[in-house]
Image: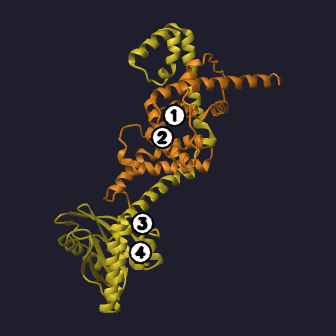
Amino acid sequence: MLTKERNNGEPQAWAAFEVEALPHADRLFRLAMWLERNRAAAEDLVQETLMQALQSFDRYTPGTNCRAWLVTILHHVRSNRRRASGRLGLVPDVDDRIASTTAFVPPIPEQLTDEDLLTALRAIPDHYQQVIVLCDVEEMTYKEISQALGIPVGTVMSRLHRGRTLLRAQLGAGEQQRGRSHHGMP
Amino acid sequence: MECRDVRELTDSFLSEQLLVETTHDILRHLAQCPSCRAEIESRRRLRTALRGAFERSPELRATPEFLESVGRRVRDHQSSRSLRAARWSFRPLMAIAASLLLVSAVAFGGREWLGASLLHAALGDHQNCAIRFRLKEKPISLEEAALRFDPAYRSLIAVAPSPARLSGGELTVLERHSCVYDRRRFAHIVLRYRGSLVSVLVTPDRFARVPSELAVEGDRVSSFRAGRFAAFVVSSASDAEMREIAAAVAGPLKNALAGA
């Protein structure tokens, strides 16, 4: 086999892609797995994302957040697939209204296991999960999340606010259930 | 700034999305408000815990096999796309080579026909191995080829162009191996000259008659005999450069294969 130092542009682009993008495959997979809930589908999604990223790697600006760029592609690939299969549901645009009507924010339980957290996150609607994961786990900025999901920054902020409130409510409910079962209550 | 304002801005504060002035206002408030401090700390803890839960979850973890292979599969896919895109530009080359075969067979008989067949294989090997990395069969080392097919391949392990410095610059060896194209096994030495790839392809043959110089599409081929072998130099270099390259390669090759 021949080495990358060969002269045309393709191996050079690959070398840059290998350094900049491929190290994010691990994190991309976690996100894909969270979204797809199926290992084969997640692997397929990550592979398709990386293929598309390589094809348009000339549009990536070196020095910017490569992972956010890849996450944006991943969401586009997933949206296109879901649209093609007729599974893309419309999210009602009621985030602002709900956010402004949510008054009570339960305290976050002191003792939380990873399972408690992930179960609670799973229990809230998908569009809230997405922004929480992109913000808190992927550490993307509001602007990056807005670009990745194709929604305004204001909607990102309201979904985050509402999503976190719902997450806390779920965690609180889980804590109550654990407390009941701990004390032998039904 | 009041507690209510701070609570409304907590998400943005934790995400570091606020203006510097607003961040300072919140920090000033937190310095004197234990309740908001506790709330901010609680939310920060939740974020950190969530990130940790994602990282530790075995269900969300990619398998080592997937991580190891995904890069290769992405690259293979890209190469096949490039190959498909290049097929139209490569097709005339193949058509000309095929025509050469036919014309040679009709006009000159068996030896010429075989020469044209070898030439076609050498051009194809240069295009598909050196340029596009697309061969059906994985190349092997010359040492392995010597053990499995012909001890003479071992003679080419150290052969180098002489002189290595030509009028336009250095003629550098990039790689050497044995590969197969169109069922013909070659010793393949890949060199670089003035930014272009040069293939030196050597294959056992006593019979074929090949033209010493030929231009097919963008590639030029020089061929010569070295003992019981036919050798081809293939590159997109100019005629003058090709003559220089072939001269630098032919001597050492003939010496190396003289007794083989």
The three-letter amino acid code for the residue at tag 4 is Tyr
Label 1 vs label 3, nearer the camera: 1
Do the residues at pointers 1 and 3 share their chain? no
Label 2 vs label 4, nearer the camera: 2
Q: Residue B247, located in which quarter of the rendered image?
A: bottom left
Expressed as whole percent of the image width and height from the top left, the position of residue A105 reads 62, 18
Q: Residue at x 54, y 23 (%)?
A: A161
> Which residue is under mark 3?
B134
Expressed as whole percent of the image width and height from the top left, the position of residue A56 reads 39, 49
The three-letter amino acid code for the residue at tag 1 is Leu
Alpha carbons under labels 2 and 4: distance apart? 41 Å
Alpha carbons under labels 1 and 3: distance apart? 39 Å
Chain letter tied to yellow: B
Q: Secondary structure at mark 3?
A: loop
Q: Secondary structure at mark 1?
A: helix
Q: Secondary structure at mark 4?
A: strand
Do the residues at pointers 2 and 1 share their chain? yes
Q: Residues within 10 Å of mark 1 (few under 14, many from 20)?
A: many
Do the residues at pointers 3 and 4 share their chain? yes
Q: Tell me which chain the residue with mark 3 is part of.
A: B
